[in-house]
Image (cartoon, rainbow, N blue to C red):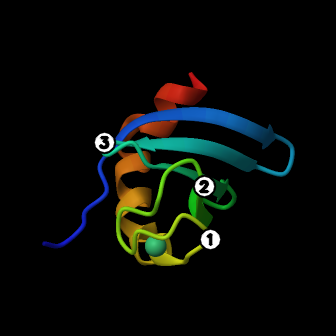
Amino acid sequence: MTYRPKVVGVDKAGSNDKDGLYEFVVHLEDGTMCRVFYNRFPEWKLTNVSRLLKTPCPICRKDYICNCFDKFKGELDAQLQDGKIEQVLA
Ligand SMILES: [Zn+2]
């Protein structure tokens, strides 16, 4: 079965408005949480993603650091930029 993350919630975790840097905590449908970093200049770009170590990785099942979510940067970015960032910053 292919894993596909589904974003169900986003919290703003920090920002530097002047430099356009933002940090969000993303909640996925399966209970996984990820920290994602964005640079909004010149346009919103996801620069880094790391899984919070609260639950084992849904992909490799490790409960420590892994890089599995690197593969899903594009997928997470697409879902976040589909209105979710706007919502959390509104
Ligand atoms: Zn993993």
Of badges 3 and 2, nearer the viewer stands 2
- Picture quarter with the C terminus: top right
Res 47 visible: no
Distance, label 3 to label 1, CA atoms, is 20 Å
Distance, label 2 to label 1, CA atoms, is 7 Å
Which of 63/85 is in front? Answer: 63
Residue at x-position 69% and y-position 47%: 23
The CB of the residue at mark 3 lies under 8 Å from ligand 1: no
Give the vertical position of 68 relative to 63 (above or below).
below
Task: Report the disc number at residue 28.
Answer: none
**Residue highlighted by disc 1:** 65
Q: Are marks 3 and 1 in contact (CB under 8 Å)?
A: no
**Residue highlighted by disc 3:** 29
Q: Amino acid at mark 1?
A: Ile
Give the vertical position of 21 relative to 68 (above or below).
above
Image location of residue 81, percent across then percent down: 43, 48
Q: Amino acid at mark 3?
A: Glu
Q: Amino acid at mark 2?
A: Leu
Task: Report the disc number at residue 53.
Answer: 2
SS at badge 2: loop
Disc nearer the start of the sequence (3/1): 3
Residue at x-position 36% and y-position 62%: 58
Disc nearer the start of the sequence (3/2): 3
- Picture quarter with the N terminus: bottom left
Give the vertical position of 50 relative to 79 (above or below).
below
Image location of residue 76, percent across then percent down: 41, 58
Q: Are marks 2 and 1 in contact (CB under 8 Å)?
A: yes
Which of 72/56 is in front? Answer: 56
- The answer to whether residue 35 is left or right of residue 14 is left
Residue at x-position 49% and y-position 70%: 62
Disc nearer the start of the sequence (2/1): 2
